Image: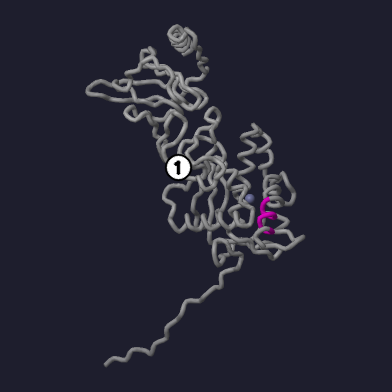
Amino acid sequence: MFLVKKRMYNELFEDYSGDCRIDFPPQIHDFCQLQGSGNKEEIFFYHGDHLSSTQMVTDDNSDYVQAIMYAPFGQIISEYNALWHQDIIPNFTFNAKPLDEESGLMYYSARYYDPKGTFNSRDLLFEKYFWLSPYAYCANNPVIYIDPDGKKIVFAEGTSQEFKDAFKAAIQHLNKNKVGGIASHLEKSRTTYYVAETHGEDTRFSPSERTVYWNPSLGLETDEGVVLSPTTGLNHEFGHALIYDVSKEAGKGKEYNADRVKGSDPDYGTKNERTVITRIEQRTAKALGEIGEGQVTRRNHGGTFVPTESPTSNQKKAITLPEFIITAPKVDE
Ligand SMILES: [Zn+2]
């Protein structure tokens, strides 16, 4: 493999050895495209840089068929094969997004991007980032960030409208009470997080799936006699996601895993849980008026799930017994 890579590197370097110079990354991106045309099948290997932008395309003979140089915002400055769009090679270019040769735009799932540096439609989350132009790409920092689909917290597939409404209400409730910071951190993260609907008591954050599972109709009654709303429960799980995100960005995977070892904290089960409960859950519950000054939500990781009046409420739902209709016994006529 090394010899093949080296040969490609040399060939490419000769072509670009004029005034400009490209440093090819050592890794070959595991992104290849199999495309059939008529009765001919070909395989292409896309060699990406740190932003997954195609720098070089090679075929199955390890010959290069395309090489591209970009301006920082993705405009193509120089390409080896300017006619490649007439061939059968798919035009994955900047951030590995498909280039539409006719318009010169790239398709980014949610919208089209003009590589001169702007999107042609507004950012889906433009209301949240009002200090940025809604047409700006990656906060005008395309060298560090990529924006695969315009949103960073996404709903899992098959999510019901009812759940989306409950989620929206919870986020608004958090924002209104000035504890929406964790959600907005996750939205701005480089990692995409998912929110999935559950109907049981399995409200949790899964680091491997980067998914918060949430039941918007269950609050938690703790040993302190406090009832926490489903919204506080959501922010609790976001807290777990936040710790994951921050640890990941800081390269502190080892510390993160150590804090999640069962028994690492005598009261809360894990150190990770202690941090979330004593810092995030407590602060959220206080801001939402679910606990008073000097009160704690709980001193352990326990509690009983209870249905509440709404996703933002910490009032236990009054249990209504089904109505029995008593009728006189039928008499045969
Ligand atoms: Zn937890």
Residue drawn at point x = 37 percent, y = 89 percent: 329
Q: Which residues are magenta?
A: 280-286
Q: Is residue 30 visible?
A: no
Q: Which residue carries the number 1 mark?
A: 122
Eyeballing the image, is 214 above or below 66? below
Place of residue 234 in the rendered image (x, y in percent of width and height, measured from the top left): 58, 53
Residue drawn at point x = 42 percent, y = 83 percent: 325
Eyeballing the image, is 316 above or below 68? below
Q: Quarter-wise, where is residue 173 in the image?
A: bottom right
Q: Describe the colour scheme in one phrase.
A: one colour
Eyeballing the image, is 60 above or below 176? above
- Queried whether the magenta region covers residue 225, the answer comes back as no
| Viewer-proximal residue among 293 and 107 | 107
Place of residue 34 in the rendered image (x, y in percent of width and height, measured from the top left): 34, 25
| Viewer-proximal residue among 48 and 228 | 48
Residue drawn at point x = 39 percent, y = 34 percent: 107
- Count of marks, rendered view: 1
Eyeballing the image, is 312 above or below 323? above
Place of residue 281 in the rendered image (x, y in percent of width and height, measured from the top left): 67, 54
Q: Quarter-wise, where is residue 61 in the image?
A: top left
| Viewer-proximal residue among 317 and 259 | 317
- In the orientation shown, which residue stands out farthest toward the left? 38
Q: Secondary structure at mark 1?
A: loop
| Viewer-proximal residue among 175 and 234 | 175
Question: What is the chief secondary structure element of the magenta stretch?
Answer: helix
Q: Amino acid at mark 1?
A: Arg
- In the orientation shown, which residue stands out farthest toward the right? 294
- In the orientation shown, which residue stands out farthest toward the bottom? 333
